[in-house]
Image (cartoon, rainbow, N blue to C red):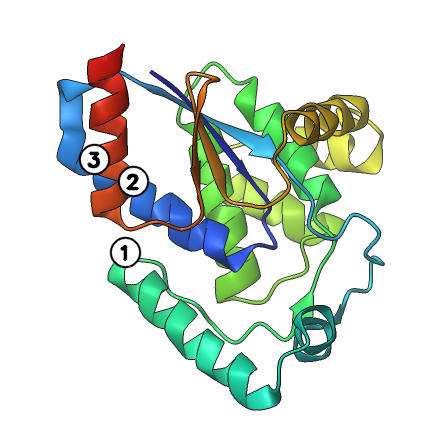
């Protein structure tokens, strides 16, 4: 079974969705052989490198009141805690294109777990520590924590390597109809949308596996 996890580092529900999916995979165990791949999607492709205030951005984008925003954050943090993700106080929204370039590179490594480790490290840095995922030094340090070579990571970030590949992948997934994340695509045919519960993920994956 191939799982393509289409998401953005800037998406908090993608952090919930990934951890929830992994709780489901733990329950499935070896029942279903699978490959997990992370695919790029940018919620804010035109975001300035300096980022913007997260509260102002969310209030403007979704037209919520401050009270609604606070309530949504409480719900989000509770959902994250339930599946093992700890949210911090992130005060800015950052550009994520360079993070996706690193994820593409990580996906080319011979060790299959490296890309997943980097994805977790990026989500924790962004939503847990409020770090700037458009900053080269920050991304190099995150790559190192995930087991990647820091010198090569810096070389990639200071150049243009994998930019075309990331843009092509983003275009491909958009053309398949994906316009919101997280979107979990199974065997390039089945779609599970949103930060579902572990139970929903497990049930869906077992059903798809039975159907062949």
- Is 145 or 201 nearer to us in this picture? 201
**Where 51 falls versus 149 (above or below)?**
below
Q: Secondary structure at mark 2?
A: helix
Are discs 1 and 2 less than 8 Å apart at CB?
yes
Q: Earlier in the sequence, mark 2 or mark 3?
A: 2
Which residue is under mark 1? 83
Instruction: Tell whether 137 sits left or right of 116.
Output: right
Residue 15 at what x, y percent from top left? 45, 52
> If the image is split into quadrants, where does the N terminus sit?
top left
Q: Of label 1 and label 2, which has the lower sequence position? A: 2
Q: Which residue is mark 3?
A: 203
**Residue at the location (54% across, 49% down)?**
122
Q: Looking at the image, can residue 42 be seen?
A: yes
Q: Is residue 189 left or right of residue 30?
A: right
* SS of the residue under disc 1: loop
The answer to whether the residue labelled 1 contacts the one labelled 3, judged by CB atoms less than 8 Å apart, is no
Instruction: Please say whether residue 146 is visible from this viewpoint.
Output: no
- Provide the residue designation for mark 2: 22
Q: Earlier in the sequence, mark 1 or mark 3?
A: 1
Taking depth in this image into account, of 89 and 79 the one nearest to the observer is 79
Return the residue nearer the eye: 39 or 131. 39
Separation of residues labelled 2 and 3 (CA atoms): 13 Å
Which residue is found at the position 50% from the left and 84% from the top? Answer: 70
């Amino acid at each position: 079974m191939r799982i393509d996890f289409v998401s953005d580092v800037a998406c908090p529900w993608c952090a919930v969705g990934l951890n929830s999916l992994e709780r489901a995979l733990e329950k499935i165990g070896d029942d279903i052989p699978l490959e997990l791949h992370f695919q790029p999607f940018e919620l804010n492709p035109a975001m300035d490198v300096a980022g913007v205030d997260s509260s102002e951005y969310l209030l403007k984008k979704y037209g919520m009141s401050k009270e609604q925003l606070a309530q949504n954050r409480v719900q989000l943090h509770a959902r994250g805690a339930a599946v093992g993700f700890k949210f911090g106080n992130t005060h800015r929204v950052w550009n994520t294109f360079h993070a996706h370039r690193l994820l593409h590179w990580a996906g080319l490594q011979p060790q299959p777990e490296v890309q997943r480790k980097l994805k977790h490290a990026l989500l924790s840095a962004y939503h847990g520590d409020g770090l700037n995922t458009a900053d080269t030094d920050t991304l190099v340090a995150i790559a190192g924590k995930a087991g990647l070579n820091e010198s090569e990571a810096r070389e990639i970030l200071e150049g243009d390597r994998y930019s075309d590949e990331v843009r092509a992948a983003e275009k491909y997934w958009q053309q398949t109809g994906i316009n919101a994340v997280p979107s979990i695509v199974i065997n390039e045919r089945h779609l599970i949308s949103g930060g579902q519960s572990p139970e929903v993920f497990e049930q869906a994956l077992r059903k798809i596996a039975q159907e062949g």
